[in-house]
Amino acid sequence: FGLRAGKLAVAQPKAREAHKLLANPGAAANPFAPRKPVVALVHGTSRQDKEWPLASWVELGQRLNHSGFCVALAHGNATEKATSEQIAAALQDAWVWPTMALDALTDTMARCAGVIGVDSGLSHIAVALGLPHVQIYNFDTAWRTGVQNARQVSVYASPTPDVDAVWQAWDGLDTPVLCH
């Protein structure tokens, strides 16, 4: 794809705003500024049968928080935003990203320590960016995602993978200690 983590040129004002939020962790004016590595959770997808249960997202987010990560939640529509807000409300250290155009969202995601998500366009962008990534599948189509390596893995189970399986996959990835 020709994409490199942190090297995307983005001209939109929202992208610059999001970049500032992540670039200056100590900014007192920004209550959402992360003070630790950020893992983006991508729960939104185009089909209901690709979704992962809300309770599973919350439990995964809690494990990430307890392991020293801040959780970021993206959304593409009002329903996804409501889900992001529900997940964030149940966590100690989480924030819902503002609505952004795809280029701004890609630039913001590129600055994360990793991504865990369902089969969606944003998850595929995380792979293209070379981010540590766990992709959650509810049915056996994981073979379509391509090569598995030390930074990207797929987890499949029917009806859905449990949190332990997703956590084990995340824990086994080559993840950085800090965001870049």
Image (tube, rainbow, N blue to C red):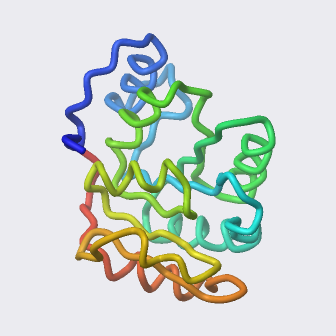
Q: Residue at x 44, y 77 (%)?
A: 154
Position of residue 161 relative to residue 153, above or below, is: below
Q: Residue at x 47, y 24 (%)?
A: 28
Image coordinates for residue 109, horizontal then vertical, percent: 40, 42
Identify which residue, 105 or 27, lies in the foreground. 105
Identify which residue, 146 or 94, lies in the foreground. 146
Image coordinates for residue 147, horizontal then vertical, percent: 27, 73
Position of residue 82 relative to residue 115, above or below, is: above
Q: Locate residue 72 relative to residue 13 in the image: left or right.
A: right
The number of discs equals: 0
Position of residue 107 relative to residue 137, above or below, is: above
Q: Locate residue 33 relative to residue 83 in the image: left or right.
A: left
* Position of the C terminus by quadrant: top left
Q: Residue at x 57, y 52 (%)?
A: 93
Q: Residue at x 80, y 43 (%)?
A: 79
* Position of the N terminus by quadrant: top left
Image coordinates for residue 130, horizontal then vertical, percent: 25, 55
Q: Locate residue 158 relative to residue 63 in the image: left or right.
A: right
Identify which residue, 90 or 118, lies in the foreground. 118
